[in-house]
Image (tube, rainbow, N blue to C red):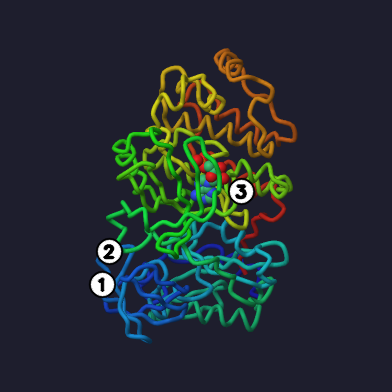
Amino acid sequence: MGSSNSRQKDLEPEEPMHHANGVNAQPTQRMSGMIYVALYDYQSRTDGDLAFHSHELLEIIDQSHSDWWRARSKISHMEGYIPSNYVAPVKSIEAEPWYFGKIPRIDAEKSLLQPENENGSFLIRQSESSYNDYSLSIRVNDEVRHYRVRQQHAVDGTGNVFFISRRRPFSTLEMLIEHYTSNGDGLVISLTKPCRKSRAPLTATLSYDTTDNWEIDRTSLKFERVLGQGQFGQVHQGLWNGRVPVAIKSLKPGTMDPQDFLAEAQLMKKIQHDKLIRLFAVCTTEEPIYIVTELMKNGSLLDYLRSPKGRQLKIDKLTDYSIQIATGMSYLESRNYIHRDLAARNVLVGQKGTIVKIADFGLARVIKEEEYEARAGAKFPLKWTAPEALSYGKFTIKSDVWSFGILLSEIVTYGQIPYPGMSNNEVMLKIEMNYRMPMPEKCPVNWYLIMLQTWDTDPMKRPTFDALRSMFEDLLFTDGQHYKESAEVL
Ligand code: AMP
């Protein structure tokens, strides 16, 4: 350890950061003809794609499409399409088991705190706040510590160096990791194993062939079991091409005009984000229309919150759900897209109960008016709808913000119906007279203060989703046991 003086100096870079050009400096440029390594197993789904195992070397032949590349296996010499997000250039930083790319600090903490990771488990991620630097996140018992890994030109001009402590520079990140694995050298704990990576990511589309042609043959779908009964039809778990697990939503005939739906689906297809349910394909040439999407094993957030498992969730988990939903909505906000029916019934929960994603964005717009019945009718989600949307049909991202506030009340009450004991009509009349839902029992005051902001009569005074995400992140960092910030410099 250096003196406290030199420690202080480490906090402040002595010279401006320079653009790096070393092999480890930036995520590597993707070029055809290069050798890539598989990060996960991939099973073939169609005749045209190539199956491979994790660690297998693949020569990339054609990268003209961003999501599916043509590749040749260095082992079997077979050729076919591969999902581009399953591979990384060989010897690149992305191919390292400890490199997690540009993930937020909060996600690094969530990953490291999974029970399968031990004390000293670690990962490297791109720093959120400082371009060109990295962060080393380490699990220390039930907390996560973060160290800034700086990158600068070496004083002797031999390239870039990486360091946590200025007195110990390394010419590659691998060497830095090796050093702190064999010797803590001032870190709170020596590094042990790379943080476990979650299962393989979703592919952008079902296959190369369905990327531009996503009207699929309905015989390629196998229905396995009913997942739920929605307002407009049943949802099944199924398989596409006998292999890929999907959810299939069948729309009751007459629910929407196929042409209207297809136009909307063109838009939905372009809206891709980690926190939004991926639309994979559609069958619209005959009724019933099928919508094929990503499958979420734990079903709707509303049912999950009401289940015995859900009722045991602690407030920091509920806060985390709110952050995830606000993150997805803030992406919609940035794409000028409106959800129109944001509610716990339209948020889905993943297999482990840690991930939630927003479903059914944009669908409400194409549902035939009479299907929703008159505005105040039984099916219309009146308790979730902002007053200006109810009165003048003015649906905007700000009316989504209002609905988000109602969704927060559903989360914090473990799935209670909003405005308990009040009828739709009563709510509508009272809201017009400036009444707002009282603070639900056991709701933290800071949650309620945020909810009240989302219910401002003036839509423009309601916060943006981006601001809402930050507000909930601040709650985790100030209240959460596990989320204490501990950025340190040696
Ligand atoms: P919906 O028609 O969207 O209201 O869906 C009805 C029910 O089906 C939901 O409450 C969920 O339980 C289930 N469901 C819908 N979409 C999915 C999906 N992508 N993955 C798993 N379950 C789903």
Spot occupied by residue 378 in the image (x, y as percentages of width and height) = 54, 23
The amino acid on which the numbered mark 2 sits, given as a three-letter code, is His
Above or below, 307 against 204 in this view is: above
Give how far across and how far down residue 74 sits, in percent: 35, 85
Which residue bears the numbered disc 1? Answer: 62
Depth check, mark 2 against mark 3: the one in front is: 2
The image shows residue 486 at horizontal and vertical percentages of 65, 59
Q: Amino acid at mark 1?
A: Asp
Relative side of 432 to 304, left or right: left
In screen coordinates, is 482 left or right of 338?
A: right
- Residue plotted at (68% across, 39% down): 414
Task: Report how far apart the C-alphas of labels 3 and 1 lie in the structure.
Answer: 40 Å
In front here: 276 or 195? 276
Residue highlighted by disc 3: 320
- Vertical position of residue 272 compared to residue 260: above or below: below
Alpha carbon distance from label 2 to label 3 = 35 Å
What residue would you read off at disc 2? 65
What is the quadrant of the C terminus in the image?
Answer: bottom right
- Choose mark 3 or mark 1, whichever is in front: 1
Front-lying residue, 389 or 153: 389
Marks 1/2: CA–CA distance: 8 Å
Q: Residues within 10 Å of mark 1 (few under 14, many from 20)?
A: some
* Label 3 crowd (10 A; few <14 / some 14-19 / many >=20): many
Question: Is label 2 in a helix, a strand or a loop?
Answer: loop
Question: Mark 1 and 2 residues: CB-CB less than 8 Å, in contact?
Answer: yes
- What residue lies at 66% left-to-right and 75% top-to-bottom? 186
- Which badge, 3 or 1, is on the more N-terminal residue? 1
Q: Quadrant of residue 71?
A: bottom left
- Disc 1 C-beta below 8 A from ligand 1: no
Going from N to C along the chain, the mark reached first, 2 or 3, is 2
**Is ligand 1 closer than 8 angstroms to the Cβ of mark 2?**
no
The amino acid type found where label 3 is placed reads Asp
